[in-house]
Amino acid sequence: MAPQRFQEQFDQIQRSMPGVELAMGPDDAAEFIYEKGVVLARDGEEARIVEDAVRAHFTTFAGLTADEVRRASPETNRSGITRIRVGDPGRGDRHGDRAVAGALRALRETEGNAGRRLVSRNHVVHIAVNACPGDEPVPVPHHAGPNPAVAESGYDPDSAVGVLIMDTGLMHDYASYPAMAHVQGDPQIDECDTAGVLQQYAGHGTFISGLVAAVAPNTNIVSRNTLNDAGGILESEFGDKLFEAVERDGWPAIISLSAGTSNGSTEGLLGIAAFMEALRDQPRTLLVAAAGNNASATPFWPAAYADKPEYAGSVLSVGALRSDGEFGACFTNHGPWVKVYAPGERLTGPLTGFDTPVPYIYQHSTYGTCRHHFSYACTCRDPQHLGVLSGGHETGTGTPDQVVFEGFAQWSGTSFATPVVAAMIAAHMTAHKEADPRVARQQLLAANTEFAEVRGAVVPALIPPTWSPVPVVNIPPAP
């Protein structure tokens, strides 16, 4: 059964995609979310093979006639991907789609003959725990300042390193934070609800941009609102959005991406395959991608491309360290496909409220004990709060907690470890006058002397010079 928080986030993402029916997979195991009734194939001959195979082997089970198996999108997208209808998306419930699962089975023999995967689910690519950050933001007094603090190096527009952030965009008052005065990009979608309360995820892209600006001030940051107000987008659309961004702004030195999904496969995401191939062949661009927050060793894409030899030079996957920098955060994904770790728990950066204080009501409740079975005061349980979507207030046993943001926030997730690493590479490029981010990445890791322990493995840890560790508090087990 899917964990409670995943169920809550599923509802949030489903509401943000009207007209699209979603399901959990595989088999309600809460590893990913995908579109019901549809599979993906590459345009042209491969799409025809998929259609023919489904018509021949699957239509009776799916409840479709042969004529109803058809392409659900035209062959006009930049990613070269076609959505093929294989079932009625209105049938069944959120706990999986038998039609999609059957279509995948129908293609297995054909795929073996073709030598590569021909078909996949249409996954939701989302902000990197169970479709959300490691926790919800916590207000921090303005006088406390950011952590990592803003580095002393200045901003020079002629030598600044280009960093593209694909996320939720920028809050309206982001430039009130001096370190972000030169940041450009799209506005955050739907900052507040009709009552003036901050929406969930609002400020995610601003927080990320602020981390880059603090660790590497000499950067030209462009922040795009690629992800919608619930932090998710269909895989079939995401590839096009990636292409649109680099065609609009030019290929940057570094792309910082704090989103992705697992997919039950070792072959990556079909919907972004064309973009990943273009990235691989773009010698002066590096993708720095979040490993995800499911406390799992299951590959999370596109970060896990870093473990594929053909993409090892173009992708760097980033996990999160806890607040003392010595061990992995409770929520971080892990495994050999995660190539580096950085502080990602309770970082402090700009959110909103610099101009006018903004209220926020917590959506999730903290747990009585860490849901990942850690014994320190981790993000699962501290600071304690009751949320709208869980916690018992529906039955009159509590009122959701409300806070007010006045600029800075503390937030956790591999979402935030990722821009720290992206910024450290950019800062290295500036300091060493290195124009190639892939070379800079290699130099930075080769010179690194910091290590941490994650799930028993000793891993490289990139620690920004201006970051201050925070001691952790161990909680004794309940008697």
Image (tube, rainbow, N blue to C red):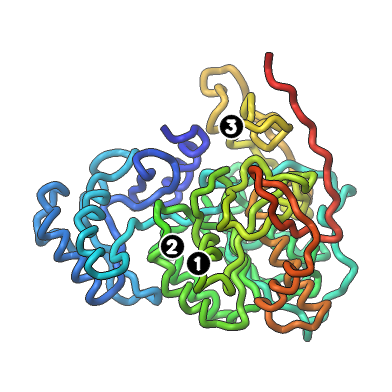
Q: Amino acid at mark 3?
A: Arg
Q: Which mark is first along the chain, 1 or 2?
A: 2
- Tell me, for residue 196, which label it has, or none: none
Which residue is depicted at the point 29% across and 59% down?
Answer: 39
Q: Quarter of the image containing the N terminus?
A: top left
Of 280 and 152, the residue lying toward us: 280
Answer above or below: position of 208 versus 89: below
Residue 160 placed where, x, y %? 76, 79
Q: Where does residue 220 sit, x and y in percent of width and height?
A: 72, 76
User: Quick check: 398 above or below 152?
Assistant: above
Q: Is residue 124 left or right of residue 151?
A: left
Contact check, label 2 and label 1, Cβ < 8 Å: yes
Residue at mark 1: 308
Q: Where's residue 292, x and y in %?
A: 57, 51
> What amino acid type is highlighted by mark number 2?
Gly
Q: Answer with mark 2 or mark 3, whichever residue precedes in sequence.
A: 2
**Image quadrant where residue 200 sits:** top right
- Which residue in the protein does label 2 denote? 268
Q: Is residue 64 left or right of residue 136?
A: left
User: Looking at the rendered structure, which numbered label has been put on residue 371?
Assistant: 3
For mark 3, give the secondary structure: loop
**How many residues crowd around disc 1 within 10 Å: few (fewer than 14), some, or many (20 or more)?**
some
Q: Residue 137 or 134: which is nearer the viewer? A: 134
